[in-house]
Amino acid sequence: MRLALLWAYGAPSPAIADEFAYLLGADTFAHGRLTNPPHPMPAFFASPEILVEPTYSPKYPPGQALTLAAGQVLFGDPFYGVVIEGAAMIFLLCLMLCLWTAPWPAAIVSTALAVFFDPPMYWVNTYWGGCLAVCGGALLLIAIGWFRISARPFTGCIFAAGCAVLFVTRPYEGGMLVLALLFTGALYFARARQPGQRHKLIVAAAYAIPVMAAAAALTAVYNRAVTGSPFTLPYSVYLAKFQMAPAFWFQPLRTPEPAFPNLRFAANQGLTGRDVATYLEVQETRFGYAGHVKSGVRLIFGLLPNLPLLLLGIGFADRRVWFSLALLGMGIFAASLEIWQNYHYMAPSIAALALLWGVLVDRALQFRMRRTPVGAAAVGLIFLVVSATPLLATARYGAYASAELHSWAHDRVETIRQLAAAGKPALVFVRYPSPVWNVDAEWVYNGADIDHQPVILAHDLGNAENHRLLEYYPDRTAWLLTFDPNGSTHFLNPYPR
């Protein structure tokens, strides 16, 4: 279905700063590099969520960028990486459910998930991520479910692979999930009555060590290429250089304000930026811990429809239910500490939520009243209800795609395409009505190889500085992009040399 919609409407245009950062990482990997050398005049190209020094790179872990790069290299467009992630997510969730429940519950729940994760749900309709982190969580539960059945040692390798996927996608939320599972494993080891059980767990843990070591070594190589140190994450460098608002609500606001590369960057990240203003409002109103717990609950249980939880009453006696709820509790706790709330932050916990539903559906299908399959009828009704809304949204996807034609993100892509079609390398200075104007609509993002791409977008830093960049690119036609202060209309005119 996603491929059909992609064929009919094309790939969506990136609009969020995070998306541009992931696309930069994808283009970097597609060029066969781990990172890019810094530009001699980085202030022209500095925008949120990317590093321009010590190297030109995204601040985020490389997982999402790697799958986007696979789509770009294999199929010519990074959005195919999003399609690959979505397919892998549903496959792994279904496999996980088959290991923990009977085949019918696995089929029902995974089909419901596939319906829900159709467009316009943003995990499968943007470059922002989500599906890959779900794959990491699913691999963890696949490993545990397989070990429960057969105690095979190779399940340790699967568990380590899940840890690696989470570390390169959502390291904080994924790390909290891994800690919860390790604690559960320690309890299992302590309560094991037969020496053979402990021995099998130790062997499986030993199988995990080489995979974890390889993942750690590759991460160290990537960190060293980007930051110069194998132990320093790109995110940490960005945080130290530019981030004013902290990651967690109990941390203080950074003061004094750091030196930003340009005024536009300062408007997005500084005291006039939307994010920091939201943070200050949170602090001033004493939103506090209780409110963040509520936000975490809304994230994990609001991401997908709640109706299957009506079956919870028949599942309290099942240890799998309590196991799933414990993992979800850890996910909610982790989210409650973060100051920003987005659905894809909860992606590592979605496998536990799917497991909870699978167990409840499994028990419901067995529930009968006087030989009448009441549980099966309830499951069928719930499936129809929870599938109706996403199916209707998918049917109306053409309206979403048409709305994008009137958005600034589509205008940006079209402007670049038209200039590239002219056949002459172009340099476009982007001049906003003011630095704080529409800070979410940032045009200045480029690919991995700035000097050789057909169209270069650069911040307007004033005539004197602009002419320095013009001298650096003497063979490019120069353009000035301006905007209507009262709207999003843009104007493209030649820039005088």
Image: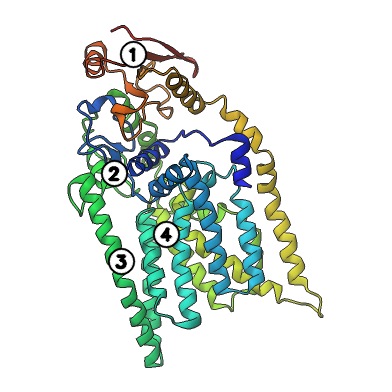
Q: For the residues carrying marks 4 and 1, which lies nearer the camera in this image? A: 1
Of the image marks 1 and 2, the number of the one nearer the N terminus? 2
Give, as a three-letter code, the residue at label 3: Met
**Residue 306 in view (yes/no):** no
In the displayed structure, does residue 149 sit left or right of residue 362?
Answer: left
Give, as a three-letter code, the residue at label 2: Arg
Instruction: Give the residue furthest to the bottom.
Output: 194
Query: Which image quadrant: the C terminus?
Result: top left
Q: For the residues carrying marks 2 and 4, which lies nearer the camera in this image? A: 2
Q: In the image, which disc is placed on residue 478?
A: 1
Along the line of sight, the residue nearer the viewer: 395 or 469:
469
Could you tell me if the residues under marks 2 and 3 are in contact, i.e. CB atoms within 8 Å? Answer: no
Of the image marks 2 and 3, the number of the one nearer the N terminus? 2
**Residue at image point 29% right, 44% down:** 33
Q: In the image, which disc is placed on residue 212?
A: 3
Q: What element carries label 3?
A: helix
Q: For the residues carrying marks 1 and 2, which lies nearer the camera in this image? A: 2
Q: Which colour scheme is used?
A: rainbow
Give, as a three-letter code, the residue at label 4: Phe
Residue occupied by mark 4: 333
Rendering coords of residue 432 (x, y %): 38, 18
Give, as a three-letter code, the residue at label 1: Ala
Q: For the residues carrying marks 3 and 1, which lies nearer the camera in this image? A: 1
In the displayed structure, does residue 342 sit left or right of residue 51?
Answer: right
Along the line of sight, the residue nearer the viewer: 269 or 419:
419
Q: Is mark 1 on a helix, strand or loop?
A: strand
Of the image marks 2 and 4, the number of the one nearer the N terminus? 2
Q: In the image, which disc is placed on residue 33?
A: 2
Of the image marks 3 and 1, the number of the one nearer the N terminus? 3
